Image (tube, rainbow, N blue to C red):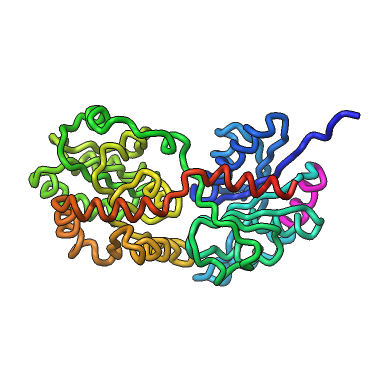
Amino acid sequence: MPEKTLSFLLSGGGTGGHIFPALSIADELKRRYPNAIIHFVGASDRMEMEKVPAAGYSITGLWISGINRSDGWKNISFPLKLSSSLLKSIRILTKYKPAVVIGTGGFASGALLYSAHWLGHKTLIQEQNSFPGITNKWLAPKVNSICVAFEGLEKFFPKSKIQLTGNPIRKELINPLPLRSSALQSFGLIDRPTLLVLGGSLGARNLNKAVKQIYPIIIEAGFNLIWQTGKLYIEDLKKEVPARKGLFMEAFLQDMSSAYSAADLVLSRAGAGTLSELAVVEKAAILVPSPNVAEDHQTKNAEALVQKGAALMIAERDLETDLESCLLDLLRNEEKRKELSKAISEMAMPNATKAIVDEIEKWI
């Protein structure tokens, strides 16, 4: 009798912070089970509907969205959307008969994993942040296992279900980074202390505004600047920021291993994936949490590092007054950068994806 083909359902969406961990997990499952069927479930109008097929996986969209907290009238259709998504999830689960259902956050993940629990399937969620989102807090009592990236989440999840695994990161960052000299050369920069600015793939308006005000001071003080502006801001900044020696500016940095290798200091948002990368590449960082994310989780992520002496933090509202002096002080203070680098490196979990899939395998 032929052996039954394993199948896995994954759901994580709305933001890259949910999608990319799910894709990393899928890639590791595919490596271990080449013949497995791997299918994604997402929200029909969100970025996963583009990113997942681009990565080579099939996906089904659900008619689901989050609860609007600022305008209650926009939630009128929510019960209908939830009912529709639960029914469609049941049909998907019946079709694929998955060995394990994996969620990495987002409202589509909630509908799928709740339905999977109701039908008796094995379930696992992966929480990227130090403060969980609504979906994963709601699912926690129902799932079989919870993989986390920060300590102390027993405040939110059943302690017996928690596995400290870390967050999946880009494969190229697990290998040794390129030589710093060749990395600097690839950006057209000379060998001097280098600041790397990361505001995410779309960009961060207020972070870009603050950097635009002080970038001449940074360069004239003898430092390089590698600036990822995000695609929403590159065209305006190209008009406003003239090309000059010591500055490399692009919408999106394709070669992050070289960017990290070149950097002596990173100025960044505090998304969970970025913080996991900074730990693995052992980079001193000043974090500027986005105030516009659910549950203010970036601030809580940053605070978890600050408490361990693993990063510095500036609130977005304080950028205008504090950023210049903080950057210059740290760029001039190699010893302090080394202290931050050592502290953040102790939080690194480079084998997170393998650890998560090891946990998934326990439930097959």
Horizontal side of 181 relative to 92 (left or right) equals left
In depth, the one of 4 and 337 nearer the eye is 337
The part of the chain drawn in magenta is: 84-95
Q: Nearer the viewer, residue 15 or 144?
A: 144
Residue toward you, 3 or 292: 3
Tally of marks? 0
Q: Quadrant of residue 24?
A: top right
Where is residue 270 drawn, in percent x and y?
38, 56
Residue 192 relative to residue 117: left or right: left
> In the displayed structure, would residue 18 be above or below residue 246?
below
**Does residue 128 sit above or below 260 in this rendering?**
below
What residue is rendered at 76% in x and 46% in y? 92
Q: Is residue 310 left or right of residue 104?
A: left
* Quadrant housing residue 182: top left
Residue found farthest to the left: 220
Q: Is 119 contained in the magenta span?
A: no
Is the N terminus in the top left, top right, bottom left or bottom right quadrant?
A: top right
Please tell me which residue is depicted at 25% across the width and 48% down the height of the picture. 265
**Side of 170 relative to 199 (left or right):** right
What percent of the width, then of the height, locates residue 343?
33, 56
